[in-house]
Image (spheres, grey):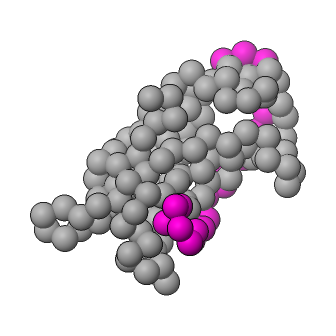
Amino acid sequence: MGEVIDLQSCLIEPNNCTFDVPVVITFQFDSKGVSDVTWEVQYEADYTNKRHVIQLCSVGPCDYSAGNHTVDLKIPAVNTEGVKERRLLSMGILKCVLCSGKEEIVSVNLVTQVTRDGDGNLVRMMMSPLE
C-alpha cells in the first residue's frame, strides 16, 4: 500500500446494505512511522465517467510509530443531495487518504458498486482493496 504503511486487513461494517447507512472501515496496518497525519475520506460517484466528489469525514491528526496499528474510520451516511441518481448507479470509489498537511501519503481505495434492490432502494457493496 505504499512506503509508509502496509495494509494488512480491511473490515467493512455494514456492507451490502442501503447506500444511506453509516459505515465503519477498520484498517489494520504496519507503519514505518509517521506523525501528525490525517485520514481524509471521500466518495467519488460515477468513477468511470464524470466524477462527483462527496467529502465524508476527516480523522486526526494521528501519530503512528513504527509497528502495527488499527484505525476505525467512522463514515456518516453519504449526503447525495445534488447528485443525479444515474451518477450514483454505477461504480464509485470510497477513497481513504492518509495526508501529511496537504500532501497525500497513501490512498486506500474501495471500489463501490451501487445498485437498486427489489424495493427501489440504493444498495452499496464495497470491495476490499485486499481481495
The quadrant the C terminus occupies is top left
Residue sitting at x 74%, y 23% = 31
In the picture, measured across the screen, residue 6 lies left or right of residue 16, that is: right
Q: Residue furthest bottom?
A: 82
Q: Is residue 51 above or below residue 24?
A: below
Is residue 42 something one can see in this rendering?
A: yes
Depth check, front residue: 25 or 16: 16
Q: Is residue 69 above or below residue 82?
A: above
Which segment is the magenta one? 45-68
In the picture, measured across the screen, residue 70 lies left or right of residue 101, that is: left
Q: Position of residue 125 (x, y in %)?
A: 35, 49
Residue sitting at x 29%, y 61% = 115
Please tell me in which quadrant of the rendered image residue 5 appears.
Answer: top right
Q: Position of residue 86 (x, y in %)?
A: 38, 75
Residue 66 colored in magenta in the image: yes
Task: Report the predominant secondary structure element of the magenta stretch.
Answer: strand
Depth check, front residue: 5 or 39: 5
Q: Is residue 21 above or below residue 1?
A: below
